[in-house]
Amino acid sequence: MYSLNGSTSEDVFGGVDLQGASFPLHGDFYCEADDVTRGVTLDACALSYHSPDNYQYDDVPSFLFHAGTEFKQKDLHLESDVLQQMPAKALGSSIPRPAFFEGDEAPSPPDDEFFQFELTTIVVLGLLAAQIANEIVDFLDKQVRTSWVKKVSRRKLTIKAEVCLEASHCEAKVRIYRRASGGYSVEMQRRQGDVIAFNRLWKGVSEHLNSCMTSVGASSAPQSTMPAVVEAIVPELPIEDGDSSAASVEPLLSLAGCSDPRLQAEAMLALAHAAQNSKVAAQLCTRQVFILLQKMSEAVCFNILEPLSRLVYLLSALPQARAFPEMQYLQESMKVVGFVGNSCTLVN
């Protein structure tokens, strides 16, 4: 290496001994002296667009197409996914009902020789694309109350939702495609979560769409090959006697205290299910447990807050739990994020 004084030494740079010398390198040695200007670039895919009527669009072209030319610049505001993760936003019903309108058309399937539909696909006849999508949203709202429709796209005709069924949770995405021969293909994909919960959800949605076709007089549509429906498997309560209750729930409490949201969700689902046993619920009435649950109430995940609301509901019925101020805080927290009581309806 060359130094400024002409010497060639790997230990000398600019007359400074590099052996034992420590100095920060604040940039490129060869750049011209200039003021540094830093900015922020936001990915348009990470933003949501809202019209004056508070309808959410997933991209600018979709917003401009449906908003027309009457909106003003001040009417368009952006909301990042981080802001949407606030509890009131994340679990509030920010998507209007109906979510889809006449004129919303489904795209054609991808023109790719390797593309094929999932086994969980049903062909729907006699209904428009917007009607099919609204029927699915309506099914999630009314027949699966422990569900959250987190995102819809009117341009792509897609629905993304999370569902909690007893001790299991899954996230699913529904896509609707226009068939060249008439009708629509409704495909449901499991994005994460329990396979059995997804299977129960798919069974309920497919039966609901079949009933809709029957009501409009459409003939039974041919379906893709579907696997045998797996019946609901609800694990038995692991606690039978009070002596072993504390030791049995301790691993679940430790799991709930970890930093992985998915593991926390699994633990909360198991605790909410186990707390249906009065002996287990009584063992959970300690200050340490309530402090842990209070920390869990700050989460912004539906699959954590939904079972937490069930657990708080069960514990609040016990006299020994009402003496803890943390219990009052938990009850108020559940009301703020939209969970009140134990409204749990399962898909049969």
Image: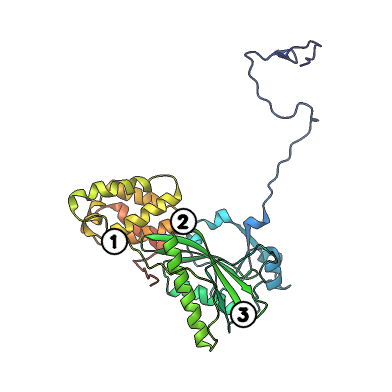
Q: From the image, tell me which residue sits under label 2.
A: 301
Give 62 or 9, whichever is nearer the viewer. Answer: 9
In which quadrant will I find the N terminus? top right
| N-term mark: 3 or 2 | 3
The disc at residue 314 is 1
Q: Is residue 310 above or below residue 263?
A: below
Q: Amino acid at mark 2?
A: Cys
- Mark-to-mark CA distance, 3 and 2: 36 Å
- Mark-to-mark CA distance, 1 and 3: 46 Å
- Mark-to-mark CA distance, 1 and 2: 20 Å
Can residue 122 be seen here? The reply is yes
Q: Position of residue 18 (x, y in %)?
A: 67, 15
Q: Position of residue 190 (x, y in %)?
A: 51, 62
**Secondary element type, mark 2:** loop
Q: From the image, tell me which residue sits under label 3.
A: 183
Q: Residue furthest bottom?
A: 217
Q: Residues within 10 Å of mark 1 (few under 14, many from 20)?
A: many
| N-term mark: 1 or 2 | 2
Q: Position of residue 74 (x, y in %)?
A: 68, 64
Q: Which residue corresponds to the image point at 57% horizontal and 77% vertical from the top-left?
A: 123
Can residue 100 be seen here? The reply is no
**Secondary element type, mark 1:** helix
Q: Which residue corresponds to the image point at 36% horizontal and 54% vertical from the top-left?
A: 268
Q: Position of residue 312 (x, y in %)?
A: 32, 59
Q: Residues within 10 Å of mark 3 (few under 14, many from 20)?
A: some
